[in-house]
Amino acid sequence: MIIRQAKLLDADSIGQLIYEFYEESLSAYDLGFESDAVKQTIKQIISSNIAFVSEESERISGVIAGVINSSIFDYRQTVAYELIWFVSKPYRRGRAGMMLLKKFEQHCENMGASKIVMKHMENLNASDMNQLYERKKYKLMELEYIKNIKVAV
């Protein structure tokens, strides 16, 4: 298995992973999935050079990506925000997830980030993810809630 920077040629494979993530987690929250929007977002993320994939037997098995911005509270502080971190189910008990996280952390540090904000879905291995983040010295910072306020068209 290798961990490498994502390329535009990976967009379709990453899109399949994101759809798998959507089906496994986000669909439970009545969020839509629009393929063209996802493809455009993937291309933007890949172009930002803060996207990495795990590749096993010439198949992309996982992805991690994020953005780096100045803190809205202190422009002198640069913070990396994870946008997605997902490994396909058949590869979760291997090393892909941890290797992706390590690569992401190293890259963000090299890009000047002083902090990294990670997240996880409440309905996708939440207990395991909480333990992992605590073990990796992350602190719980915020919880998010979602509410339907308008019927989707």
Image (tube, rainbow, N blue to C red):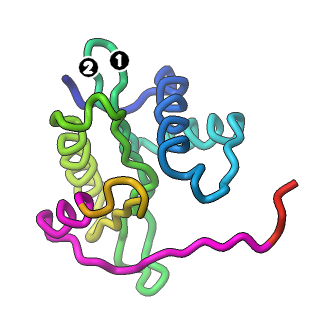
Toward which corner of the image does residue 143 lie, by quadrant? bottom left
Residue 142 percent across, percent down from the top left: 40, 79
Left/right placement of residue 47 relative to residue 147 reads left
Q: Looking at this view, name the residue that lies furthest to the right.
A: 153
Q: Which of 41/13 is in front?
A: 13
Mark 1 neighbour density, 10 Å: few (under 14) some (14–19) many (20 or more): few
Magenta extent: 128-149
Question: The N terminus lies in which quarter of the figure?
Answer: top left
Toward which corner of the image does residue 67 lie, by quadrant? bottom left
> Residue at label 1?
59
> Residue at label 2?
56
Residue 25 percent across, percent down from the top left: 49, 50
Residue 33 percent across, percent down from the top left: 67, 43
Question: The C terminus lies in which quarter of the figure?
Answer: bottom right
Please say if 2 is above or below 62: above
Left/right placement of residue 18 relative to residue 96 reads right
Check disc 1 and give the amino acid type: Arg
Q: What residue sits 41% from the left and 41% below the top?
A: 49
Please say if 62 is above or below 122: above
